[in-house]
Image (cartoon, helix red, strand yellow):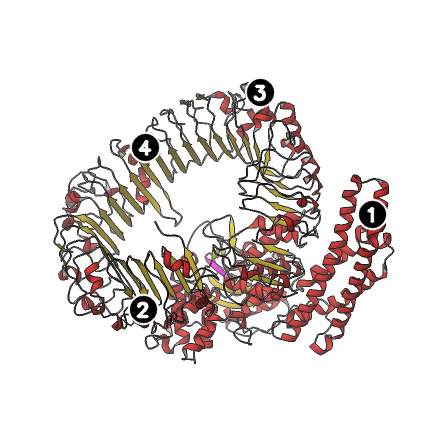
Amino acid sequence: MAGALVGGSVISAFLQVLFDRMASHEVLDFFRGRKLNEGLLMKLKTTMISVNGLLDDAEEKQMAKLTVKQWLDELKDAVYEADDLLDSIAYEALRSKLEAGSHSIANQVQNFFAFRDPFGKEMEVNLENILDRLEFLLKQKDSVGLNLKEGVEEKPFQQKIPTTSVVDEYGFYGRDGDKNTLIDLLLSDDANVNNLGVIPIVGMGGIGKTTLAQHVYNDSRVQEWFDLKAWVYVSEEFNVFKITKDIFEETTLKTSDVNTLNKLQLELKTRLRGKKFLLVLDDVWNDKYGDWDILRRPLKAGARGSRIVVTTRNQNVASIMCTIPTHDLGELSDDDCWFLFAKHAFTDGNFGSYSTLEPIGREIVRKCKGLPLAAKTLAGLLRSKENAKEWEKVLKSSLWNLSNDNILPALRLSYHYLPSQLKRCFAYCAILPKDYQIRKEKLICLWMAEGFLDQPIGDKEAIELGEEYFQELMSRSFFQQSRRSPMHFVMHDLINDLAKFVFGEFCVRLEDDSSCKITQKTRHLSYLRTRHDALKRFETIHEAKLLRAFLSVSLSSHSIGERLTVRYLSFAGTPIKRLPESVCSLYNLQTLILMKCKDLVELPANMVKLMNLCHLEITDTSLKEMPLHMGKLTKLRKLTDFVLGSHSGSSIKELAELQYLRGKLGFWNLQNVLDASDALQANLKGKKHLEELQLRWNGDTDNSLHDRDVLEQLEPHRNVESLLIVGYGGTRFPVWLVSLRILSIKAFDGVVAIGDEFYGNSTSVKKPFGSLEILRFESMPQWREWISYGDEAFPLLQKLSIKKCPNLTNTLPSNLPSLTMLEIQGCQQLGASLPRAPITLSIKLVDDYRNFWFGKMSSGLQRLKVERFQCHPFDPLLVQMGGLSTNVDEIEIRNCNALKCFPLEHFSRLKTLSISGCANFESLSASGRPLGDSTRLSSTCVLSTRGLPSKLQLLWIHHCNKLFDSRLRWDLPRLPSLSEFLIGTIEEVESFPEEILLPSTVTSLTISSYKYLKYLDSKGLQCLISLRELTIKNCPNLKELPGSMHSLLPCLMKLVIFNCQELVSFPAGGLPSKLESLAVLRCNKLIAGRMQWGLRRLHSLLNLTIGKDKDVESFPDEMLLPCTLTSLKIKDFQNLKSLDYRGLQNLSCLGELKIWKCPMLQSLPVEGLPSSLTSLIISGCSMLKQRCQCENGEDWPRFLTFPSWKLTMLPPVR
């Protein structure tokens, strides 16, 4: 993609596709056969060539000039019409070709002449209308200010102000970790780094790459480390001479009048020789290796330890320039983004005096999705505005429509410099809802259906081209890998907004807001299904008469045949049982998705007519067989599954013709292969694009030799890396098995022992399974013995998993040098002895009697979890872990009655310790003596003065009375990092916490299940000056809270009180003034006195949860709640009959109201609800639910006056 045209119009690539279609034999034969005016095609091509000359100028000016955008939209619509017309012609030609064989010659002639005049004349008239429209638009070019351009200008459409190294010292939030990481790399003396280390900082536009580089550049440690420093702003134009000159002038502090690159580079080389320098190249776009190679030649003269920092939004640039791994810069947290916003929106960043603006501002910041530039820009817009309505206007507006001064130009610039074919692919992504997680393969299929991949380059197929396009957009930060699923990708909200802005009214997403307007120009429509979709949402869909894509809405079977040109069709997850035969008339269909159609039992018999089908996904269906003649669908590139019928359907040998299948292929019911030679004819060995193969038998053939022969003939190409075999009835394994990377074996009921045949049974194989990285066994009830092949097998095995093999004894391979993950589940006879594996990072041993888990979590932290060791000792496992224990960050021990002591001294890096349900647990020391007895600890332990690891941050102890007795010897105040503390299920304690128990660093304290606790000890609380969260639950005798709670806990922001039935009131002195969240549940006496809580004095209170009470009949009381409240949750008020409008009317900031399990609540207030409300969730309120039913409920009209509301009716929570 490096050599592709940069900055071309999004329509330019579209026009090239149209030119190719006009010249195709289908279209030309159509015009000639019907004796239509062929000159119209030439005229159309000439007109479009003229239009193409204006597109680059229009593309550039549309951002700032509304008339140009309107002109461009009209042009896009006309081009779409032309494409629709050519598509209809191509479809008719294909239909005639496919259906010709099913009619007699006489019928063909009769049908041809009967049909040709109306259809052909209609196409001719339509083409003339399109030409008239295009010619009219051409005549308007002068009035809208468009000029003919020769190619694309290299200069950007708006001159950017160059960046400098001068930094705002007080505007840096949330990047300290990134800054320290980069400084460590700059100051490193790593011998593996070349003399000239290049560190790229990569991220989307506006993410803060330049700001981070500025703070690193100006850090005092960096200033002292380097002899010379230079900051050069590069931007889009990578002029080697200019950049070299800037570096020279920066390092010499002199101007240069040298006018040749040769002399300039010689002088720079002399200046840098022997000097350790730091160079920042800010905002680099060029990804041509040759230019970079020329620029860096004189830079190599610097001393060892010289560094270059490059900021770029393009991963390709980073890969070309870097010598040190790329630093990917992510979004800011909402809190950090808020502090940045506040700094620029309020004088000196002081938002304390603007209590009404803060909650609105925080919602605005959430829209920025962690993008610092967006937060800073919006703060600038609001800096002089103190009216809440102005802020709400910004909150409810799209960031792309807030002003006319080119808001967020950094993101638009990324789009501007995309090649034209990528602009089309990117703009199409406007159809995706925000935060939508999409698989790469699905998006490529959608692009393919739109014709975006109809211009294969060289030998590349459309799918390969799509993968290249996607990777290019990914490298330019238009897509990000999902944090939830590595197989899915997501667009940042503002990038999504950019796509929507570019695509305009041609794409509509039916969302919760009222801004979705369907017009005749709408070609693409999507919506995200919800539980309660109202038909009203689709009332205007008839306006989109030329719809090309309609995603997520299930098409009715009778309408499918009407959409003859459809290329992408998905029924995924629907209850459909059979596809209608009309699907087989969709001759242009390329992608058919039937995944998770669990009731689907058969495919249409005439599927062979779908000659253009490339992608058939039938995973997780109930298909019994494949239709006949599947081998004729030769364009198939992805076929997820092939189901073999017992007496009919396609044979496995049909696959012989499908040579280009790629990705994953799964066979079902291999017991139905009657002749092993059929499996050979399938020619899996010749399918070099397959990567994953699944072979399933379902039923006993009573012929293990036949099963073995079939498996032998199913040898895949060596490119297959992953193999799953399920239900195989043979007694030995094929020789070709040993070349795999991933092998899964499941449900081999007859296998008793695994021996030589598993390893290939050949003395020539010195290291069997030399490539295998993952090996899984599951559900093998008779397997008893695993005979090892010395120490040579499995040299690269990283993961070994054995599940549900209850008779397997203690005979695992003894030496697995590369093993990093061991998982054993449901193998009761298998002991705790582990293979020799010096780098094991994860161990899992689970059955009915024990659960031992050690490994790395998604956060990157190492965790040890021990459960249910009632009889089995787990000390041997800890011993075999060896030095790994020193790296453990988290330990959780639960329900281990046999456990009396634990060697905590071996876990020096421990940050989290949780122990519960260990009634006999007495000591956290291997010696079994009290932990506080430091004289008995090993001298090699890195512990705090009295024993607990000094890095401990979280300590939870529950149901461990014997351990609790020694709590004062733990010496917790000496732990500098302890921030979260829970200790529960204690019977004899009446007062807690003791004065010397807890350190001042604790930010979260939970007191749970203290049967006799009567009060909280003020002396123990007074040291908790950092406490932000306090939870008290299940303390049935607690009668009061400290009277001076507001001064004892000045930083408290969250208070939860649950099931404290004797607690009557809050302290007379009031609750802490910074409290933001309060929850009171199952506290009848306390709730009865709620008017004395003094909530209206809490100006920071944002969230209130209250409930589990039988006495409240009306809520909230007048004058009870503060106007700052943004979220109110009412839960389990069994006798609540009404919501009191007088208590709600002053809640001007309330955005969320949730009502759970209030079965007697009859209606909403007649006067209405606060106008600020955006979300109302009702669950388990049977009487109210009926009144709020969509359209028919008595209370429904009240919702219609608030179009921004989101009403959710959930089933009762059980």
Amino acid type, residue under disc 3 in the picture: His
In terms of secondary structure, what is the magenta stretch mainly? strand
Residue 223: percent from left, percent from top: 41, 66
Q: In this view, does 897 lie above or below 1071?
A: above
- Mark 3 to mark 1 CA distance (whole Å): 53 Å
The spot of residue 366 in percent (x, y) is 43, 65
C-beta proximity under 8 Å, tags 1 and 4: no
Residue extent of the magenta highlight? 303-310
Q: Residue 706 carries which label?
A: 3
**Residue beneath disc 2:** 1140
Q: Nearer the viewer, residue 555 or 173?
A: 555
Of badges 3 and 1, the one in the foreground is 1
Determine crowd level at label 2: few under 14, some 14-19, many 20+ residues with C-alpha closer than 10 A. some
Establish if 104 lies above or below 135: above
- How many marks on residues? 4
Which residue is under mark 1? 111
Q: Residues within 10 Å of mark 4 (few under 14, many from 20)?
A: few
Which label's residue is closer to the chain start, 1 or 4? Answer: 1
Q: Residue type at mark 2: give it.
A: Asp
Q: Calculate the distance from the C-alpha at mark 2 to the C-alpha at mark 3.
A: 77 Å
Mark 3, Cα crowd under 10 Å, few <14 / some 14-19 / many 20+, is: some
Q: What residue type is labelled 4?
A: Asp
Q: Are marks 3 and 4 in contact (CB under 8 Å)?
A: no
Location of the N terminus (image quadrant): bottom right
Place of residue 847 in the rendered image (x, y in percent of width and height, measured from the top left)? 34, 33
- Residue bearing the label numbered 4: 848
Q: In this view, does 166 lie to the left or right of 659?
A: left
Q: Distance between the residues labelled 3 and 4?
A: 38 Å
